[in-house]
Amino acid sequence: MELFEAIETRASAPRLTEPGPTAEDLHRILAAAERAPDHGRLKPWRLLVLSDEAREKFADAVVEARRKRPPEPTLEQLQLERDKVWRSPTLIVVGCVVVPNYAKVPEIEQVLAAGAAVENLFLAAHALGYGVMWKTGPAAYDSGVKASVGLRPEDHIVGIMHLGTRQQKPPGG
Ligand SMILES: Cc1cc2nc3c(=O)[nH]c(=O)nc-3n(C[C@H](O)[C@H](O)[C@H](O)COP(=O)(O)O)c2cc1C
């Protein structure tokens, strides 16, 4: 897909099924993310493609975060949180590992670079024909959830990226 067509047709894909990206496509998608503009060449982004085992650990942490957050959840609500983590074939958590107190590249610029990596990832996956959903929500700000994917409390989760095959055509598509 040509660049402007990809930009003009990009849209969230709320429902995703198998298949997820092939290994070759995933490689291209991650390489596109790595091409994001990056002040100071810090490469602050972490593109964490979760294995099933890592995803279960992430889901456990998401459930635990919800358990701690008022109002007290029902068992069904906790199960829903877990199911949401498993809603797509491929999950990539994009983190931003922050260099603190760096005057040349303030934290906001590091986060912006990580956000640009997410957009590159989104557009690349879309251009290859995959559906994408960019999620965050309260779990993204929870230290336990961050720790479950190897991030520190001061780091950021900038995107919980679900990839797969669209169940519905995109709007206007
Ligand atoms: C930083 C960021 C966080 C987002 N988090 C969520 C989220 O938690 N849940 C969600 O449904 N959509 C989330 N989105 C996706 C937006 O809701 C979506 O892009 C917006 O509704 C516009 O729809 P479109 O992508 O189809 O143009 C997020 C987008 C960004 C940029």
Image: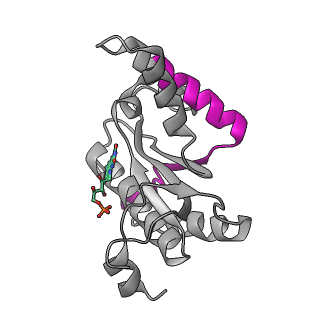
The percent coordinates of residue 39 (x first, y second) are 36, 60
From the viewer's perspective, is residue 173 above or below residue 116? below
- Can see residue 84? yes
The percent coordinates of residue 33 (x first, y second) are 50, 64
- Which residue is depicted at the point 41% across and 14% down? 74
Q: Main secondary structure of the magenta part?
A: helix
Say if the magenta span includes residue 46: yes
Q: Give the range drawn in magenta.
A: 39-64
- Which residue is depicted at the point 53% across and 23% down? 61
From the viewer's perspective, is residue 95 above or below residue 74? below
From the viewer's perspective, is residue 26 above or below residue 79? below
From the viewer's perspective, is residue 6 above or below residue 161? below
In this figure, which colouring scheme has been used for the structure?
A: one colour
Of the 4 image quadrants, the one containing the C terminus is bottom left
- Which residue is depicted at the point 56% across and 76% down? 128
Q: Please name whichever residue, 86 or 30, is drawn nearer the observer in this view of the structure.
A: 86
